[in-house]
Amino acid sequence: MVKIAVSGVSGRMGQAIVRALAEDDDKQLCLSAAIHRAGSDVLGVDVGEICGVAKQNVPVCAELGDADFDVLIDFTCAESTAAHLEHCRRHSKPIVIGTTGFDEAQKHMIHAAAQQIPIVFSPNMSIGVNVCYHLVRQAAVALGGDCDIEIIEAHHRHKLDAPSGTALRMGEIIATELGRELDQCAVYGRAGEGGVRDNNSIGFASLRAGDIVGDHTVMFASEGEQVEISHKASSRMTFAAGAVRAAGWVSHQVPGLYDMQDVLNLHA
């Protein structure tokens, strides 16, 4: 039995992951620790009460040092994830990271920690999105050089980072296949008169509204035809189920930096 700790358990994704673990039929994984920020009024409360599932006999605590676990699943914020990652590195614990919005120094920390512990780091744990990554790669090879490429994403009003990590990953895949550097060809939104479109650019547009879980569309447009690859999430449970699957998988891996393509064996 693999013991799983979940951080940020009163957040949207934290609650979904707790529910996914409670509903897991394999029973190869069990929730052993629930982490939330110090000073929260949910500390000491059984996590099942917070997440709308049966009693889990797991009270919420503020410190990973108080937790007994084999793998941590972390969907919090960049600063919290960095602190949790350091704890996992010191104690040789695998971690699944779904947090987005890291700066370059924090990304370097993740890469460095992967020399010592196994890490699954993916901006989107959805199986469907990871299939879309494959399709986007194929479309970039077949169409990208002759097309205008735009990536449109939409999320709920509370999302902090933009573009989303998933949209950026799609852009990275396309840029790599076309021999471009994303930081040199990306255009983030357009206003006013920007001139004629540079056909080497990859455009990004971000929408924030209501309770949209996550929509992503990659558009390859040329004169005469347009190809779109889209994914729409209607429930956070799709991401939670992927994260739980990743936690079970990473518990058996050697140190290294992995993504959901590895978990789902989609790299081949």
Image (cartoon, grey):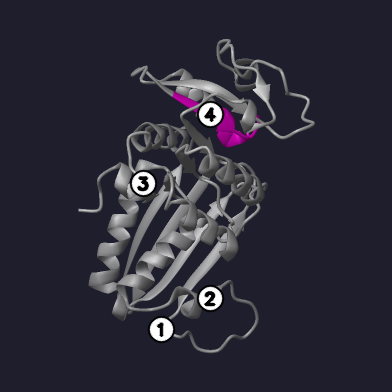
Type of amino acid under label 4: Ala
Q: Are marks 4 and 3 in contact (CB under 8 Å)?
A: no
Q: Which of the two discs, 1 and 3, labels the residue nearer the N terminus? A: 1
Residue 89, position as x, y percentages in the image: 51, 44
Q: Which residue is mark 3?
A: 260
Q: How far apart in space, not on screen, are marks 2 and 1 (Cα)?
A: 11 Å
Q: Nearer the viewer, residue 7 or 159?
A: 7
Whether residue 83 sits left or right of residue 130 in the image: it is: right
Please give the label number shown on residue 199: 1
Quick one: which residue is furthest to the bottom in this view?
A: 195
Q: In what element is the residue under mark 1?
A: loop
Q: Is residue 5 magenta?
A: yes
Q: Are marks 3 and 2 in contact (CB under 8 Å)?
A: no
Q: Which residue is mark 2?
A: 187
Q: In what element is the residue under mark 2?
A: strand
Residue 203, position as x, y percentages in the image: 49, 72
Residues drawn in magenta: 3-15
Please give the label number shown on residue 50: none
Type of amino acid under label 2: Val
Q: Which of the two discs, 3 and 2, labels the residue nearer the N terminus? A: 2
Q: Nearer the viewer, mark 1 or mark 3?
A: 3
Q: Nearer the viewer, mark 4 or mark 2?
A: 4
